[in-house]
Structure formats: structure tokens, C-alpha cells
């Protein structure tokens, strides 16, 4: 499989309500117009969501995701500086203000976390067909190494240009950790020279992490600084997988101590009702401002800490937090309910979820926000699938006073046996994925959906949106797509 062949061969129809815009010569390749209107102008022809094969949808979304991964034959052009991407660069999305009416953000950059999440899906597809080294993963490792060498002011720098230069941005210490997880996952699909490069890169990442895992960091959403549940969970998984690796990557002294410390630190985020996304530290403004203002919890990054980090899906404290997220956006009595979720419920779809209550970010300069995200919805669906798999394997439902609300939302009670509980969880997750399919632009995924109309908005073709859908379907079916 090569990124060049697959990515260049994909073409999809535009949504019937999409506005047309002229191609911008200095934009990323390929250049596409972005639909930003919240109100549909024409009737959209939807896929038969109830009959669609999610595994086949995932196969198509895999190819769509690869359009945002550069190679020798499929480069991108920077939207402002005329830079041509190096192979292995993963852009967050091909959206930038000059080519996306109503969008104020430029996503033609390489975020360490987004790139690693993408690499995990490429690795999962590649390992389904073992044998030859994978060109896309070799390019990813080479570009990741370049970025890490150029990282400044710290090795936790979050964002880079398409030629691997540090972009003025935040420091996010989950980045080196999830990148290390991706490198270990890809290791068997690399040639010997790139395995050596990956080993050295992992070594530098871990050396950095061992100096900072007890420190504050910018959180997942790049909004606050403090002690992040998500970051700590990612770091814990990183250290655990490093300690257990069988590919010959050295495990430095201090790894076991870091594992024990992070396990204790994560427990401190429980406040008796939910896991707090951030504790300690300060906000971006007033030094006395709390890390996370009122309303920042419950936060979807707690669920994402389970999907990408070390949080066990059977943790009933995690499930208690997850139940509150569903209530915020799907309960008709909630002031934060998305109207589209109420409409979708009548169709047996959804709900779709956002980042946190009162979120104002929508990719534009007006910051109207308060909309569901494709990746948040797919990540939550994956929680249902992973929990269903654990229940099926163990024959036990982790239902207690903390998780009772979570299970009750999908019709599971103490009278429900393990097999029926697993079925109910899978059905709930599928309903969420089918909502994503139903509201997609012919399977193309933006960052967000309008909370009232359901139409896509914010930046278009978000790489992480595709990767999250792929990961969720793998948890559901036990199968990987192959390129």
C-alpha cells in the first residue's frame, strides 16, 4: 500500500448545499470548497444509514484520511508561505481561511497528536497484511524525527509546518507519548534503517517525558494549563507499552517509577462525581484563575483518555463521567441539549457529542460554537464497543452505584445478563456512528456538525475525524481496513 496511489485516486461528490469557491493557487492540494452555512439551502440525499455497512464505510474513510498524508508523489502546498510538504507530513485538514469562507483557522499544519492517531490507523491497516515494509509509515517516522529534532522551545511542542519547522504554538506533553505509542505499533512495518530511526526517536521522547511527566502542560484542547487527566493517561500507556515492548527498544531507568506515580496521579482527578479534566495549575490569563472554569466538566477528553490512553473501559468512575456527557447533550431537559439529537432520536440515531458544555469554538472568528464533533462522537461509540467486548469476554457487567446511570441510558439493569448487555452497548455505539454517516457529506467528515441542523461545519476533511471513525469500527468488528 502506498499513500500516493490511494490518495490520488479518490474523488467524491460535493454536498448538494455546498457553496462553490474558486481554487486558490497557493492552497493545499487538493483544494476544496467548504460548506459553512448552518441552514441547508437544498434537500440533501442521504445514505440509507440503517442499511449501510460500517466496515465498508470505514474502508472508504481510510482512503479519505490518506488524502491528508503527504508522500513523494502527493505533496501539499502551504497556504501562506509556498512551502511544499515533505513526505510523511500529516495535515490536520486542508482548510485555511482563504479557501474556507467563515473559517478563521489554518489547519494546514502537522500536529504531533493528530499525526500519531493517524499513524495508528495506518499501522492497523498495514499489519492486516504483514510482509513488506510500509512506505507511508516509513515516511511518517522520518518526518516525525525531523519535527522532533526541530522542536522548540521543548520536545513537547505540539505543532509544525509541513516542512517540519516548529510553528509558534503550545507545549503538549501528551504528544511525545502518543507518538511513541504509534511508533511501537508501526515498528514491525518498518525497514531496518527506519526501525533504528524509530528506536532513537522513542529514546529521545522518553528521555523528555521522564523529566516532565509530573509537570503541568497545555491540555488536549489547547485552552488551559495544568495537570491534565488526558495527558497523564497517555503518558501512562506510553510507559507501560515501552516497559512491555518486545521489539528491542531500550527501557530506561525510571520507567517503572513513572508508571506507579501516574497511576496514583490519575486517581486524584476523581472528585466524587466525575473525573476532572484538569486539576491544579492556572488558566491562560489571570494567574489566580482556576485551570478549568466552571462548566468545563464533564469533558469528553476523559473518554478519549480511555480510547487513546491507559484508562480501562470498565472503570465505573469513568463510566459515571461518560453518563454525564450523554445527559448534557441528549437529555431533552438539559439546557445544553443539541436539538439535532432530539430529531435524530426519532430516527433511532445518535446522540452526537461535543467537547464540553458551553464550548464556543466552531472554527470561525465569531466563536459561536456549542456543536457536536465527529471525533468526539466516534470516540464515545468506541467506548461502548470496547466495554461490550470486555463484558462478552469476562461474562460480567461492571454495574455499581457509580455506573448505574451509564448503563441505564442504554437499557441495562441488574437484571440484564452479560450477553444482552454487550448487545445493547454495541447497538448504542452503532447508532452514534450511523448518525455520523447520516450527517456526513457523502462520507467526508468535517470537524463539527451544526447542533441544530446537523449539517457539517468548521474545517473540512478533518484527519482525526476519519481516524476516530476507523478506530471505532475496528473495536466493533475486530477487523482492520487495508490499503
Image (cartoon, rainbow, N blue to C red):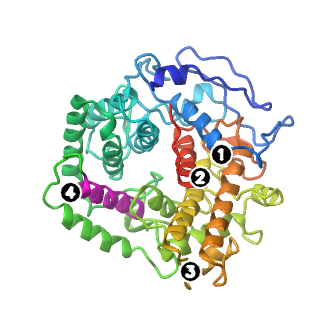
User: Is residue 42 found left or right of 297 in the rendered image?
Assistant: right
Q: Residue furthest top?
A: 25
**Residue indicated by mark 4:** 210
Secondary structure under the numbered disc 3 in the rendered image: loop
* Mark earlier in primary sequence (2, 4): 4
Residue 441 lies, in percent from the top left, at 71, 36
Between the residue at mark 4 and the residue at mark 3, the CA separation in whole angstroms equals 36 Å
How many tags in the picture?
4
**Residue indicated by mark 1:** 54
Secondary structure under the numbered disc 1 in the rendered image: helix
**Residue indicated by mark 3:** 399
The magenta stretch spans which residues?
228-245
Between the residue at mark 2 and the residue at mark 4, the CA separation in whole angstroms equals 32 Å
Residue 117 lies, in percent from the top left, at 44, 44
Between the residue at mark 1 and the residue at mark 2, the CA separation in whole angstroms equals 12 Å
286 drawn magenta: no
Q: Looking at the image, can residue 198 be seen?
A: yes
Q: Answer few, some or many: residues within 10 Å of disc 1's Cα (few below 14, many 20 plus, some between 14 and 19).
A: many
* Mark earlier in primary sequence (1, 2): 1
Residue at position x 54%, y 68% in the image: 392
| Residue 118 falls in image quadrant | top left
Between the residue at mark 2 and the residue at mark 3, the CA separation in whole angstroms equals 23 Å
The N terminus, quarter of image: top left
**Residue indicated by mark 2:** 378
Amino acid at each position: 500500500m502506498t499513500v500516493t496511489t490511494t490518495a490520488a485516486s479518490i474523488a467524491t461528490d460535493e454536498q448538494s448545499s455546498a457553496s462553490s469557491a474558486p481554487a486558490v493557487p497557493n492552497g493545499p492540494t487538493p483544494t476544496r470548497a467548504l460548506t459553512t452555512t448552518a441552514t441547508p439551502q437544498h434537500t440533501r440525499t442521504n445514505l440509507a444509514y440503517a442499511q449501510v455497512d460500517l466496515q465498508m464505510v470505514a474502508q472508504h474513510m481510510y482512503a479519505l484520511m490518506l488524502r491528508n498524508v503527504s508522500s513523494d508523489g502527493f505533496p501539499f502546498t502551504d497556504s501562506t508561505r509556498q512551502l511544499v510538504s515533505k513526505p510523511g507530513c500529516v495535515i490536520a485538514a486542508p482548510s485555511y481561511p482563504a479557501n474556507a469562507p467563515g473559517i478563521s483557522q489554518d489547519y494546514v499544519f502537522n500536529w504531533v497528536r493528530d499525526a500519531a492517531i493517524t499513524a495508528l490507523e495506518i499501522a492497523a491497516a498495514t499489519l492486516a497484511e504483514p510482509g513488506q515494509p510500509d512506505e507511508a509509515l516509513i515516511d511518517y517516522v522520518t518526518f516525525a524525527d525531523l519535527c522532533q529534532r526541530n522542536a522548540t522551545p521543548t520536545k513537547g511542542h505540539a505543532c509544525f509546518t509541513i516542512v517540519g519547522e516548529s510553528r509558534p504554538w503550545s507545549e503538549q506533553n501528551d504528544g511525545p507519548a502518543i507518538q511513541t505509542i504509534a511508533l511501537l505499533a508501526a515498528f514491525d512495518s518498518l525497514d531496518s534503517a527506519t526501525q533504528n530511526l524509530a528506536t532513537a526517536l522513542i529514546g529521545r521522547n522518553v528521555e523528555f517525558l521522564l523529566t516532565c511527566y509530573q509537570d503541568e502542560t497545555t491540555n488536549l484542547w489547547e485552552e488551559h494549563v495544568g495537570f491534565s487527566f488526558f495527558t497523564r493517561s497517555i503518558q501512562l500507556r506510553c510507559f507501560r507499552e515501552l516497559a512491555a515492548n518486545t521489539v528491542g527498544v531500550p527501557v530506561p531507568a525510571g520507567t517503572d517509577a513513572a508508571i506507579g506515580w501516574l497511576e496514583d496521579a490519575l486517581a486524584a482527578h476523581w472528585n466524587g462525581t466525575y473525573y476532572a479534566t484538569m486539576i491544579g495549575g492556572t488558566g491562560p490569563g489571570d494567574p489566580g484563575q482556576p485551570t478549568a472554569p466552571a462548566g468545563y466538566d464533564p469533558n469528553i477528553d476523559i473518554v478519549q483518555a480511555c480510547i487513546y490512553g491507559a484508562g480501562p473501559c470498565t472503570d465505573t468512575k469513568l463510566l459515571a463521567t461518560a453518563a454525564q456527557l450523554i445527559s448534557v447533550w441528549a437529555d431533552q431537559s438539559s439546557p445544553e441539549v443539541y436539538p439535532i439529537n432530539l430529531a435524530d432520536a426519532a430516527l433511532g440515531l445518535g446522540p452526537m457529542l461535543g467537547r464540553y458544555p458551553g464550548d464556543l469554538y466552531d472554527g470561525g472568528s465569531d466563536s459561536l460554537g456549542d456543536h457536536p464533533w465527529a471525533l468526539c462522537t466516534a470516540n464515545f461509540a468506541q467506548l461502548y464497543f470496547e466495554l461490550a467486548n470486555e463484558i462478552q469476554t469476562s461474562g460480567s457487567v461492571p454495574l455499581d452505584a457509580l455506573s448505574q446511570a451509564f448503563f441505564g441510558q442504554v437499557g441495562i439493569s441488574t437484571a440484564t445478563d452479560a450477553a444482552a448487555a454487550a448487545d445493547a452497548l454495541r447497538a448504542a455505539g452503532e447508532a452514534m456512528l450511523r448518525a455520523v454517516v447520516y450527517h456526513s457529506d457523502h462520507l467526508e467528515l468535517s470537524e463539527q456538525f451544526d447542533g441544530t441542523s446537523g449539517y457539517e461545519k468548521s474545517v473540512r476533511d478533518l484527519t482525526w475525524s476519519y481516524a476516530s471513525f476507523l478506530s471505532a469500527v475496528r473495536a466493533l468488528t475486530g477487523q482492520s481496513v487495508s490499503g
